[in-house]
Image (cartoon, helix red, strand yellow):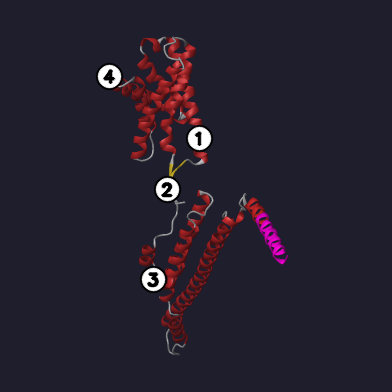
Amino acid sequence: MTLWSRFELPPSEGRRLLQRQVAWASAQALAAGGLALAGLEFTNPTLALAIATGVGVVATRPSRIYLLPLVMVFVVAATLLLAGLGFPAAVAAGAAAGVAVGGGDGVARVESLLAGIAGAGVGLFAADGLGLLGGFSVTSSLWAGAVVGICTAQALLPGTLRWSLPTRIPSPGRIQVALAAPYRAAAMRAWQLDQSFDGQAPDRATRAGLSEVAAWVYRLALTLQTLDSDLARIDPISVGARLFALREGGPNEDAFIRERRQGTAGHLERLLEHRASLALERARTESLQDYALAYLEEARAGLSLARVLPGDHTPEALGVVLGKLRTHAAESGARRQTAREIDMR
């Protein structure tokens, strides 16, 4: 099982998306019914569809109701313009709605545009198949607006999806470049363990979690390398000698020199304290790395035990075969015994 990147819909965003889509469909249905009651849907269906779609778009952002006039102008103008160029009214309205609700980067906006076009086309086809178009009644207009609205509202989906990039430990080549020789062994071991999980992890979430632990081992190796470099810059023997020399100052020093020496000694003492803290952090980081590696090793062993092995199941025909072998052996033994008795006579 290879761990690939993919688009995901977070649960909280999924609930919010559903609420916005229901609001869109409801508002577009009510707008379509109102326009049918006013007679506009029958005299100018393209304009009525544009207005109803614009109302649906605004309903997805109730906190920005003040933008209703701007959205209406944009959706109506874009729909009429595209319809004038020969595009079907539903496709034109879906394109305008997709642009209006598009969010995220440029690719997501293009996807919202395409989703709006496809959704509106599917909605119009579904409404026509259900006999909701051309009914010249408020009820049929309400239902047609709901069907077209819920389909066009799929333009909200591309802006809600999130690109999920699983955390992976780098390749061996990258490890060799980033880490010095003393720090590579743990990272290479973690990479080997991570590779062994392909095909063993029971689900994607478990595989992603194990991969994240392996990547953690690599990051801890980087931290160890950095801490050792920082520790190497502070030589405790040299600093201790400087402190000893400062404390053995001459008796004839004036107050200014004495105060400067005391201040220097204070800085050096704090430098040694910082080095002790760095050494403690290094020890903790190393213990975390050992812990993470042991965790991965245990996980691999646990997954190996959890696999279905050939010896776990006895073939169904084994009992029949053993029975036939026993019968054959018994019959052969009886024939040999009979033959011996005949020869003895």
Q: Is residue 89 left or right of residue 228?
A: left
* Disc marking residue 211: none
| Mark 2, residue position | 5
How many angstroms separate mark 2 from mark 4 (CA)?
Answer: 42 Å
Q: Position of residue 238 (x, y in %)?
A: 43, 83
In the image: residue 288, left or right of residue 255:
right
Nearer to us of marks 2 and 4 is 2
Alpha-carbon distance for marks 4 and 1?
35 Å
Mark 1 crowd level (few <14, some 14–19, many ≥20, 10 Å Cα): some
Task: Note whether 124 is above or below 292 in the view shown.
Answer: above
Q: CA distance from mark 3 to mark 1?
A: 48 Å
Tell me what residue is drawn at x 49 percent, y 42 percent: 10
Label 1 belongs to which residue?
A: 16
| Label 2 CA crowd tier, 10 Å (few <14, some 14–19, many 20+) | few
Q: CA distance from mark 3 to mark 4?
A: 67 Å
| Numbered tag placed on residue 180 in the rendering | 3
Badge 2 or badge 4: first in the primary sequence: 2
Extent of the magenta region: 327-345
Which is more N-terminal, label 1 or label 3? 1
Q: Magenta stretch containing residue 233, yes or no? A: no
Q: Nearer the viewer, mark 4 or mark 1?
A: 4
User: Would residue 142 be visible to someone looking at this image?
Assistant: yes
Amino acid type at circle 4 is Gly
Labels 3 & 4 near each other (Cβ < 8 A): no
Residue drawn at x 37%, y 67% as measured from the top left: 176
Is residue 96 depicted above or below 105 in this figure? above
Residue 201 rendering spot, x and y as whole percentages:
52, 53
